[in-house]
Amino acid sequence: MEVIAAASRRQGSHGDMLSLSAGQPSTPAPRPVLAAARDMLDREILGYTPTPGIPELRRRVAALHTDRYGYEVDPASVVITTGSSGAFTALFLAAFDPGDVVALARPGYPAYRNALAALGCEVAEFDPADRVRFQPSVADLERLTAETGAPPAGLVIASPANPSGAIIDAGELADIAAWCEAHGTLLVSDEIYHGISFGRRCASAWEFSRNAAVIGSFSKYFSMTGWRIGWMLVPDDLAEAVDTLLGNLNICAPANSQFAALKALGPEAARELDGHVERYAANRDLVLGRLDELRLPLVAEPDGAFYAYVDASAYTSDSLSWCREVLDATGVALTPGVDFDSRDGGSTVRISFAGAGGDIAAALDRLAAHFAR
Ligand SMILES: Cc1ncc(COP(=O)(O)O)c(C=O)c1O
C-alpha cells in the first residue's frame, strides 16, 4: 500500500508512472456485468439481500464449481461475501479461538497473518520443503506438528499463490486435505486466482474434503475487484456460526454487485475474461523472457495468477527502500517482498503482469536501462 501511494505521487508529479505492482486486473468488469449493474439501478430497490446472498447467485456459484471441478455443491453451502476478504474474517472468527495455532507457508499473502494475529491466534509460519513452488506438503505439516507438539487448528493455503503464482500439485492437495481431516485441522483453501493459470491444473480442496473451507472471489479472474464480492463453500459444522457472524459484520454483500455478478458467470463474460487470461499469458512470457537480463531470477514457478516473485539479492537486502529508489529513478513501481515474507522478503520483489502488454514492455525497458548503468 505504501508503494501504491508512492506510485500515485509519482504519477502526480511526473505523469510517467508504469505499474508492475498492481494486485488487480487493469480491466473493468465484463461488459454484461456493467450492463446488468446499470439496469439494476433502475429495476431493483437494492436493499439488503439475505445474509448468505441472493439464492440465484448461490446456485450459480455452486454450478461454477461443478463445471470447473466436476463435484456437486449444495447451494446452501455457498455464502456470498464482501470479497474473499469478508469470507476470511468471518471464517477465522467462526473457526478459531485466541491462542489457536494456524499454519501458513512462507512466502504468503500478508492479510491472513495480520487478520489471524489480530484475532489472537498464534501464526505458525513455516518454510515448505518444496523450494520450487514453496507450497506446503504433508511432510511440512508433520514437521510443524512435531515442533509445536500438536497439529495446528488451521492451515491456510493459496493456489495459485500470491506473491508467487505457484499452484499446488493436485495429489499433494489431496494428501493435505486427508491429513487435515485426520488431525482435526481446518483446511482453508484460498482459490481466488482460479481461472488464471498457464497449463497447470488448479485443483479445488472440495474435490478431496468437505471439511475444508473453500474461498473464491470475483476480484481476479472475473475482473471485479472494487465490486467487493466473493464467496465461500462452508463446511457444515461452521455454517451457522459463519452465517451469524456475516449477519453482524456485513449484513450482506453489496446488492448490486450480487445481481451483476450473475452475468459474470455467463458465456459472453467468459469470452471476454478468457481474453484477459490470454493477455496475462503473453505478459508472463514477456516478463519471464527479460528476467535474466534484469538479473532478477525467479524465486518460484509462476504457474498462475499474474505475478512473478523474483530474487533481487543482486541489488538489495532492503527491498522496501530499493523499490522506492527504483520508482524515483525510473517511474516503475514494483512490490517489495517484505510483506509476503517477513524474514527473507528484504531481498525479493513481486512483479505484476496484470497490466497492458505495451506498458509492461516499456517498464521492463526502463528497468533494464537503469540496472545497466
Ligand atoms: C491470495 C489472496 N487472497 C485474498 C485476496 C483478497 O481479495 P478480495 O477480497 O478482493 O477477494 C487477495 C488480494 O490480492 C489475494 O492476493
Image (tube, grey):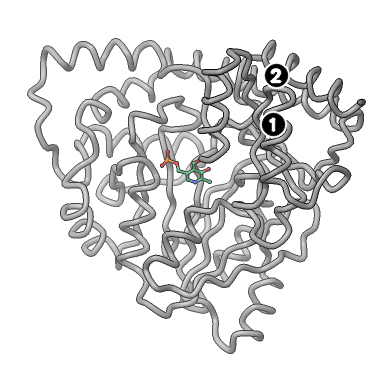
Residue 60, relative to residue 161: is it above or below?
above
Q: Position of residue 326 (x, y in %)?
A: 73, 32
Instruction: Give the amino acid type for the residue marked by disc 1 in the picture.
Output: Phe
Q: Is ligand 1 less than 8 Å from the beta carbon at label 2?
A: no
According to the picture, the residue beneath numbered tag 1 turns out to be 198
Q: Which residue shows up at 60% across the image and 45% down it?
A: 162
Q: Classify residue 220 as left or right of residue 238.
A: right
User: Which label's residue is closer to the chain start, 1 or 2?
Assistant: 1
According to the picture, the residue beneath numbered tag 2 turns out to be 360
Question: Which numbered marker is on residue 357?
Answer: none
Residue 240, relative to residue 280: is it above or below?
below
Q: Can residue 71 be seen in this view?
A: yes
Q: Which residue shows up at 91% across the image and 28% down it?
A: 293
Provide the secondary structure element on which disc 1 rests: loop
Q: Which residue sits furthest front?
A: 13
Q: Where is residue 39 in the image (x, y as percent from the top left)?
A: 19, 11
